[in-house]
């Protein structure tokens, strides 16, 4: 008896790993699940991961992404946020769905595009992963050439820069030099859970303006 994908039920915070999955099977899975789904699907050289985020995961993702947008706005830097858009490359046999991602220096190259094709378009410049229930693997992002990767584990924000094809942990974001974001963002995130989102966003905006 063959198990259908629709029969698989994952509770929030859980993940399913499948091996020996072909690129064609991965493509078919994306089509069957569609874009309006609560799960995230990643693929790397035959290994498929399906994960259902926790509410806490989603809260952290939204607030951190909002803080990134505040910095970009205050620095007057054009950007494009594409959320959990699926980025894939058949040649590299990789497919990822970040918690959020941003085009910054390459924003103009994808401005207004309804579809991103990595055979001709650049990958995102910055990706964000919330690693509360699982640990993000570097392989997908390194293979696709995402220049900067942030990982937040519920307590610490880790900033990684792609150097010579490998991620190196750095103290400051290459996109925001002079801003101690690995220290400050977790503080504002935690405060937002007590004082509320709007109050903290305003406070963070004021802090950024002082730094500028």
Image (cartoon, rainbow, N blue to C red):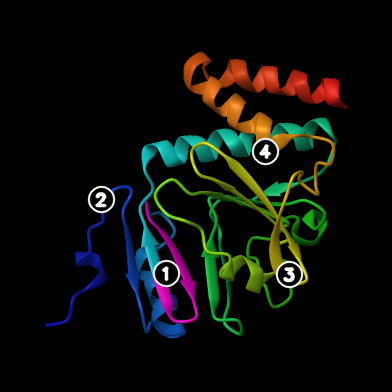
Q: Nearer the viewer, mark 3 or mark 4?
A: 4
Kindly identify the residue that appears in the image at 22 percent across and 58 percent down: 9
Q: Is there CB contact under 8 Å for labels 1 and 2? A: no
Q: Earlier in the sequence, mark 2 or mark 3?
A: 2
Of label 4 and label 1, which has the lower sequence position?
Answer: 1
Q: Quadrant of residue 35?
A: bottom left
Disc 4 marks which residue? 182
User: Does 194 sit above or below residue 136?
Assistant: above
Q: CA distance from mark 1 to mark 2?
A: 19 Å
Q: Which is more foreground, mark 2 or mark 3?
A: 2
Q: Residue 70 lies in what quarter of the image?
A: top right
User: Residue 30 bears which disc, if any?
Assistant: 1
Look at discs 1 and 2 and give the one toward the viewer. 2
Q: Earlier in the sequence, mark 3 or mark 4?
A: 3
| Residue indicated by mark 2 | 11
Q: Which residues are magenta?
A: 38-48
Name the N-terminal-most of marks 2 and 4.
Answer: 2
Q: Residue furthest right?
A: 212
Q: Position of residue 111 (x, y in %)?
A: 76, 55
């Amino acid at each position: 008896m063959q198990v259908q994908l629709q029969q698989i039920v994952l509770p929030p915070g859980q993940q399913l790993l499948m091996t020996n999955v072909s690129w064609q099977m991965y493509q078919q899975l994306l089509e069957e699940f569609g874009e309006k789904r609560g799960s995230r699907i990643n693929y790397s050289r035959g290994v498929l991961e399906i994960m259902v985020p926790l509410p806490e995961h989603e809260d952290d993702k939204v607030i951190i992404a909002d803080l990134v947008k505040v910095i970009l706005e205050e620095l007057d830097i054009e950007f494009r946020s594409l959320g959990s858009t699926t980025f894939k490359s058949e040649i590299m046999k990789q497919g990822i769905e970040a918690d959020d991602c941003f085009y910054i220096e390459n924003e103009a190259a994808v401005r207004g595009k309804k579809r991103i094709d990595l055979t001709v378009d650049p990958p995102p410049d910055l990706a964000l992963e919330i690693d509360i229930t699982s640990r993000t693997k570097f392989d997908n992002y390194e293979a696709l050439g995402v220049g900067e990767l942030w990982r937040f584990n519920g307590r610490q924000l880790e900033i990684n820069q792609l150097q010579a094809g490998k991620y190196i942990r750095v103290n400051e974001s290459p996109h925001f030099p002079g801003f101690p974001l690995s220290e400050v963002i977790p503080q504002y995130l935690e405060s937002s859970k007590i004082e509320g989102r709007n109050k903290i966003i305003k406070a963070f905006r004021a802090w950024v303006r002082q730094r500028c």
